[in-house]
Image (spheres, helix red, strand yellow):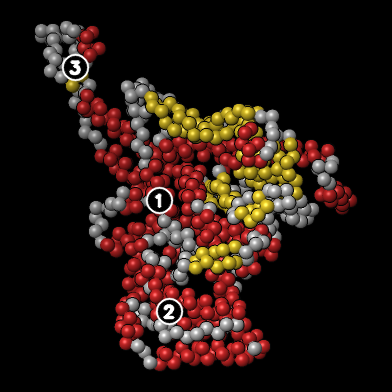
Amino acid sequence: MQEKLGEREKEKLEEAKRDPFLDRSFYEETVSYVTDELQRRKTEKSYLEVQWQLNYDFLEGRQYSMADFANSETIEWDRFEEGQERSVHNEIAPIIETRRAKQRQLNTFMSVISSTAENDDIKNAEITTQVLQNTYNKLSFTAKLEHAINLSETLGTVLLKNVWDNNGGELVGEDASGSLLYEGEILCDVISPFEFFPDDLSKQTLEEQFSVIHAKVYSRDELFLLYGIEISGSTNSVYRLGTVNHTTGNYDYGTKQIISLSKDELKDSAVLIEYYERPSRFYPEGRFIVVCEDKLLEYKRELPYRNDANGKRKFPFVKIDCISRVNSFFGLSVIERLIPIQQEYNAVHNRINEYLKMTTIGIPLIEDGSLLEEDELEVVGFMPGAPIRYERGSTPPRFMETPTLPATFINKLQELKQDFIVVSGVSEISRNSTTPGALTSGVGIQLLQQQDDTRMSLSGKNILEALKQCGTQWLYLYKEFATTARVVRYTGMSYPICRKWTKDNLTSFDIVVADDSNMYSNTALTRELAGTLFAQGFFNGSRFERLSYLSLLRNGDINKAFQEEFLDIKNAEKENYMFQEENEIPKVRAEDDHELHLKQHNILRKSDWYRDILCKTNNSLAEQFDAHCEEHQKYLTVPKESEEQHEGTI
């Protein structure tokens, strides 16, 4: 056994050294391995794709569909009897729309915690936070996140792919051949689960997968224009939205066109396959292989990016689950749980509709042979106001008496509506802005809203955790590829300012997003919190402390309300910067806000750089700066009347 293991290890070591572009047999083996792996994973995942199609059908109102796992498609089942009512009363669509709207209210603000309490680290953390926010805006990530939430809520899982684009960002010059050079920028793509193939469906996280495949169908022109790849082209299956005939209502209603997600054939196309393999004994940096048709386009003995801690490499993907499944890579959509309830809800509603039709139209009772114009009446029926001629002495036609609709039907509908609420986590107050009839208490209504938030918090937490992972990968990509100085624009608590940064400023990767207490942004609750803090005396401290509290609330434009204070903070930080970089002692001006200036200067004076380096190497310069701070302190000993009045207005 040991000998066999040793031989196998030698074979793998030799294989790891082979170059497919120099070894034709290894070239063909690599292409065959990747294409075979894709086919295997497609087959294993086919039952999930049918379920995803069914989810979409029910969302769009095609609710008489069923899964045909043998042919990997959804089909429509026929009526059990002629004249059977089969209307659609779609409760799933408003539930999912409400969930999407709620998830879009997530507090997606990302901030970075400094690695130490040192002034430089705090400043770097502030810069890093702004880098994240700038990247978020440049990527139009709000729209991407909305698209991801839609896919996650419908299909159960969506993935985000974070890569580096060498042709993105600002133009920096030209190379020797005259080609344009750009500083490079991050790209983030939303990946449908139809395009993603993990190695093992029973492993729940990306980190557990040994390898993953991202496979996407492109037309011949797309591959040439985007990647410069020339292909022969073939016909490939893709999932697309299209229209299908859907029979609804009674047989008199006929059919209508409805949107459905189904397989379509794309001619003159090819599948671009990206194979990612995590680091292992034989490939310490992992592997990255790109195959298209029978061509090996790229082969690297390392994953593309150092996007993990300590310079390690990992998959450039982030997964978002609507509801995580145990021992399953792909998550669960709420729609999948709602389908049985929706089917029963439609059935009960249709039985009620049939009863109403029977009551309003009626069922005539006619004595055999009593009508004089029986053939004509069978065609046109009993027209309102039209005379009915029948044989003398026979029983006149009459309508059959219909029993009262049993209360069981109405009770069953109410039970099913409650089941919708329990399973989806969306109550009437969230979906319809209505409250149960017996509930009038404001506290009770607030408790219902909190319960909705609690039920949907599992999906919300998955989204925020994915956002945190994306932010971390963005920072590591900048750390690896941002070789030139860049500009970041401050927008948060502070003031409008631009500052250069380099990858050396990225010293902390500890990203914080919203927690349970402020997961969903709510303007009314934020204002209520501000009022509570004010009543409890949180704003009775210095103006600097009050500005800090207000900035943490992140509600409204406080820059306008406190423009003068922010200008003083900006000027004080600029004085600190000029002192550190150019040894320039600033001049105290009478119009300065001396409290805010002194606060900023003291932050610098308490740093290790000031105490352990400057005071020992250039003590005279430190004494000059101390004298500058003492001059500010002298102004504070004689408060101005205008300052006292301003204190009372904040």
Q: Relative to the observer, which residue lies in front, 135 or 298?
A: 135
Mark closest to the chain's N terminus, 3 or 1: 1
**Which residue is pictured at 28% across the width and 40% down the height?**
410
Mark closest to the chain's N terminus, 2 or 3: 3
Q: Relative to the observer, which residue lies in front, 230 or 580?
A: 580
Residue 347 is left or right of residue 516, and the answer is left
**In this picture, is 136 found above or below 189?**
below
Residue 244 in percent (x, y) is at: 45, 28
Mark closest to the chain's N terminus, 1 or 2: 1
**Which residue is pictured at 32% across the width and 32% down the height?**
350
Q: Which residue is mark 2?
A: 544
Q: Residue 101, which numbered label?
A: 1
**In this picture, is 636 found above or below 492?**
below
Q: Secondary structure at mark 3?
A: loop
User: Label 3 vs label 1: CA separation?
Assistant: 50 Å
Q: Residues within 10 Å of mark 1 (few under 14, many from 20)?
A: some
Q: Is residue 207 visible?
A: no
Image quadrant assignment for residue 59? top left
Q: Which residue is mark 3?
A: 382
Q: Relative to the observer, which residue lies in front, 465 or 458?
A: 465
Residue 114 is left or right of residue 303, and the answer is left
Residue 245 is left or right of residue 167, and the answer is left
Residue 127 in percent (x, y) is at: 55, 68
